Image (cartoon, rainbow, N blue to C red):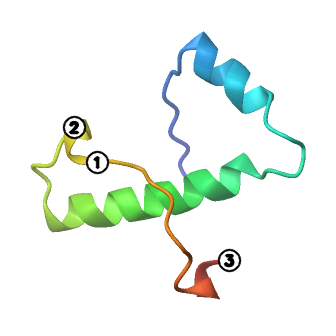
């Protein structure tokens, strides 16, 4: 599998490192990237400003 990397600012990196040990950051990112790619497949003209990340109640537990 190919790996993709993107730079993040130091403040964001420190905030990620400061998360409690029980928070599995990679699981959150896998879900976010999956949704993001799905939306880009539907409309490739979307840009970063077209996306908002927000928390919602879980409706489907199959993605766990």
Task: Residue at 15%, 48% (x, y): give it.
Answer: 46
The x, y position of residue 29, in whole percent, is 58, 51
Q: Residue at x 66, y 22 (%)?
A: 13
Question: Does the CB distance between marks 2 and 1 fall below 8 Å?
Answer: yes
Mark number displayed over residue 64? 3
Label pair 2/3, CB-CB below 8 angstroms: no
Is label 3 in a helix, a strand or a loop?
loop
- Where disc 1 sits, the SS reads loop
Q: Is residue 29 left or right of residue 64?
A: left
Snapshot quadrant of residue 15: top right
Image quadrant in which the C terminus is located: bottom right
**Measured Cα–Cα span from mark 3 to mark 1:** 22 Å
Above or below, 18 relative to 44:
above
State the image quarter where residue 42 is shown.
Answer: bottom left
> Total number of numbered labels?
3
The tag on residue 49 is 2
Near mark 1 (Cα within 10 A), the count class, few <14, some 14-19 or many ≥20, is: few
Task: Give the numbered dot on residue 51.
Answer: 1
Give the CA separation, mark 2 to mark 3: 28 Å
The numbered mark, 2 or 3, whose residue comes first in the sequence reads 2
Q: Mark 3–mark 1 contact, CB under 8 Å?
A: no
Quarter of the image with the N terminus in it:
bottom right
- Seen in the picture, residue 5 relative to 14 is either above or below; the reply is below
Query: Is the residue 62 above or below the residue 2 in the image?
Result: below
Q: CA distance from mark 2 to mark 1?
A: 6 Å
Q: Is the residue marked by circle 2 packed among few (<14), some (14-19), or many (20+) residues within 10 Å?
A: few
Q: Is residue 23 left or right of residue 58?
A: right
Q: Position of residue 28 (x, y in %)?
A: 62, 55
């Amino acid at each position: 599998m190919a790996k993709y990397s993107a730079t993040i600012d130091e403040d964001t990196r420190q905030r990620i490192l400061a998360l409690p040990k029980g928070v599995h950051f990679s699981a959150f990112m896998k879900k976010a990237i999956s949704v993001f790619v799905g939306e880009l497949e539907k409309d490739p003209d979307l840009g970063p400003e077209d996306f908002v990340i927000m928390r919602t109640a879980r409706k489907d537990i199959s993605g766990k």
